[in-house]
Image (cartoon, helix red, strand yellow):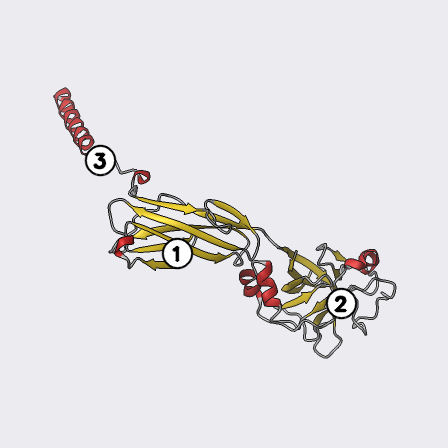
Amino acid sequence: MKIVRSLKIFGVITGVVISLTSCKKESENIFNMFTDVNVTFKGDHPFSVTDYKEVNDGDSVYIDYTVTSAKEDMYQINVLEIGSAVPFLRIPITDETKRRSFSGVVKLRANVKSGKTSYRVWPVDKRGVYMGDGYKQVTIDVKPNFTHISNRRIYLPDTVAKVLPCYFSIKTGNTYSYTTGEASSADIDFGIFRTTSATPVINLYSLSASPLPFVPYNISTWTKRATLFSAPVNGHANTFNNTIRTGTLLETEARRRTINLRATTTGLVSGSAVYFLTPENKYGCILVNAVSSDIEGKPFINISVKVQN
């Protein structure tokens, strides 16, 4: 009886497996779908990009395309920056004679951000349904034209040992103390100090300031680099991190400020920024990430800097 029952169970299982196998349907390969649409990128103009192109900040870029559809009419062309949720450009096809073959040129300026940005072009049908793009895209690579220096700690000066790094060079990204600064003073853009007012604040100053706002250190024999600064702009972290993404945008933001100070007076706080102009006419921005003290209680500011190359 046990053998017969086992055979019956085996027969049922086998039947179920055969039934499921016979119902199995292969999924359509996505790379075999949307084959009726073809997108061609043309290189007829010096600004055109057909696949990958390295450009400079501020260069013009043309996406010169032709989209063809073998079987269905196209009603709109979408242009998407890859990484975005929605197309930044939608072009209706109102001419019925162009609904199987449509050409256009998208003109861009490479000044939004440094690095690689890719674009796709595709049509949609009269219902707004994606018709395919031939799995093609174009990429522009904007060469960086600014330097980003992150998280440098600058201490308030100590008047006894004189070894705390209280000076900063934008060119080298290094900090210097009074004892190490003279040899590199030609590169030093600013130092920091704290006011002696009833409500002390930290400010920065150029070594070329006259009179010097911090006098305990004798720097009469040092080279005085004449970097100029703006007044601090509070609440500027988002602009520094997300808006200033090319040298062109950095200069645009800097030119909105008056940059004529050799020392700030209103105080540096977390999130504030100071724009500057170097003697070489390079614009930049200093972001104060934090105003704090180390475990020994020594006050410092933590800064990041962006400066044009």
Q: Which residue is mark 1?
A: 85
Assess disc 1: are there few (<14), some (14-19) or many (≥20) residues with their C-alpha within 10 Å of its C-alpha: few
Q: Which residue in the structure is indicated by mark 2?
A: 206
Question: Residue 287: x, y in percent?
Answer: 63, 64
Q: Residue at x 15, y 27 (%)?
A: 9
Residue at mark 2 to residue at mark 3: CA–CA distance: 74 Å
> To which quarter of the image does residue 96 belong?
bottom left
- Residue 33 seen anywhere in this rendered image of the structure: yes
> Mark 2 and 3 residues: CB-CB less than 8 Å, in contact?
no
- Residue 94 left/right relative to 236: left
User: How far apart, in angstroms, are the residues tagged by discs 3 and 1?
Assistant: 33 Å
Task: Tell me which numbered mark, 2 or 3, is placed earlier along the sequence.
Answer: 3
Indicate which label's residue lies in the foreground, 2 or 3: 2
Q: Quadrant of the N terminus?
A: top left
* Left or right for 295, reference 7: right
Amino acid type for the residue under numbered disc 3: Lys
Residue sitting at x 77%, y 58% = 187
Where disc 1 sits, the SS reads: loop
Q: Specify the amino acid type for callout 1.
A: Ala
Give the answer, above or below, for where 155 lies relative to 8: below
Judge whether 238 appears above or below 183 on screen. below
Q: Quadrant of residue 245?
A: bottom right
Q: Residue furthest right?
A: 221
Identify whether 48 is placed above or below 271. above
Residue topped by disc 3: 25
Q: Nearer the viewer, residue 37 or 187?
A: 37
In the displayed structure image, the side of residue 101 where residue 283 appears, left or right: right
| Residue 41 or residue 144, whichever sits in front | 41
Question: Residues at badges 3 and 1 in contact (C-beta under 8 Å)?
Answer: no
Is label 3 or label 1 in front? 1
Residue type beneath disc 2: Ser
Q: Residue at x 47, y 48 (%)?
A: 49
